[in-house]
Amino acid sequence: MSEREGGYIRGFLTGVLLGSIVGAITALLLAPKSGRELRSDIRRRSEEIYTKARELFEHAGEEVAETLNEARQRAQTIVQTAQEQADALIKDAERTLQEARSRITSVTERVREAARAGAEAFRSEMGSSSSSPSADEPTQQDS
């Protein structure tokens, strides 16, 4: 129960209590009775009103306590669910990160191998072209 609803209930119960008291006193004062009977009736009615008011407040207190317990349980369930979802997201993120690292390692290794092969092919090409003259290059005899 929200604080606002608690304020409404408290105001309502206060109004009921005050209205009952004013109504009882008005009814007793307007009734044609002797002073002793009137005082006795006022005492009896005020005890009844007090008992009813106490029962109303006790009942309202029980309802508030019950509502608070329900709210606590809901909040606990929400927190637990959020924690479970966060744990699942963290596990998924860790798995995705591990997969990405594995892919990066694999791609890096392939790039290294390709670079080595390219360098080796370049060296091989450079080595074979320097050992045999090509047809386009002039020889010493031609000059």
Image (cartoon, grey):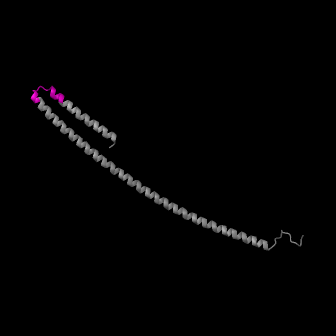
Residue at the extreme bottom of the image, as rendered: 131
**40 lies above or below 136:** above
- What is the count of numbered marks? 0
Point out residue 108 in the picture as x, y percentages from the top left corner. Answer: 60, 65
What is the magenta segment's predominant secondary structure?
helix
What residue sits 14% from the left and 32% below the top? Answer: 42
The quarter holding residue 46 reads top left
> In the image, 112: left or right of 57?
right
Q: In the drawing, does residue 33 fall left or right of residue 73? A: left
- In this rendering, is residue 134 above or below 61? below
The segment highlighted magenta reads 25-37
Q: Is residue 2 magenta?
A: no
Quadrant where the N terminus is found in the figure: top left
Q: Residue at x 14, y 33 (%)?
A: 43
Quadrant in which residue 128 is drawn? bottom right
At which x and y percent is residue 38? Answer: 12, 29
36 in the magenta segment: yes
x then y, percent, for residue 34: 9, 26
Q: Which quarter of the rendering shows the C terminus?
A: bottom right
**Left or right of residue 53: residue 70:** right
| Residue visible at 69% across and 68% down in the picture | 119
Q: Quadrant of residue 45?
A: top left
Would residue 31 be found to the left or right of residue 13 on screen? Answer: left
Against 39, residue 54 (above or below) is: below
Report x, y in % for residue 97. Answer: 52, 61
Residue visible at 23% across and 43% down in the picture: 58
